[in-house]
Image (cartoon, rainbow, N blue to C red):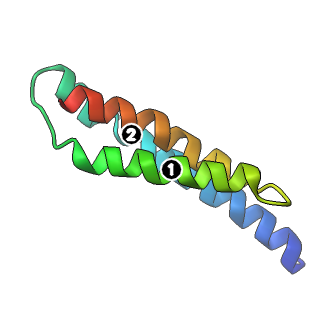
Amino acid sequence: MDQEKFIKYLSWIATGMSVMMYVSYLPQIANNLSGVKGKPIQPLVAAINCTLWVIYGVWKKPKDLALATANFPGIIFGLFTFFTAL
């Protein structure tokens, strides 16, 4: 396998792992909604960080859609976790 093909596959595997990382907020969200409040700072910082990476990935020339796609769920899940933890 050539290096370019390897990097392409690696980027999409890393994208999948990033999405799974942010989906892992679901148990904390469930706890927050049931009254067991978690700490809101980490998911807020994650959401801000992901927002910056999505902007970078979309505005970069050439665009880095794997990077943007990997971080987009972090915005949604991070903010939802933050707000439910308040």
In-front residue for pair 18/60: 60
For label 2, the SS is helix
Residue wearing tag 2: 78
Question: Separation of disc 1 and disc 2 at Cα?
Answer: 9 Å
**Percent position (x, y) of residue 59?**
75, 52
**Percent position (x, y) of residue 14?**
61, 60
**Mark found first going from the N terminus, 1 or 2:** 1
Q: Residues within 10 Å of mark 2 (few under 14, many from 20)?
A: many
Q: Residue at x 87, y 73 (%)?
A: 4
Q: Is residue 40 left or right of residue 17?
A: left
Amino acid type, callout 1: Cys
Residue wearing tag 1: 50
Asked if labels 2 and 1 touch by Cβ distance under 8 angstroms, the answer is: yes
Q: Residue at x 34, y 39 (%)?
A: 25
For label 1, the SS is helix
Vertical position of residue 36 compared to residue 14: above or below: above
**Percent position (x, y) of residue 60?**
77, 59
Amino acid type, callout 2: Gly
Which quarter of the image is occupied by the N terminus? bottom right
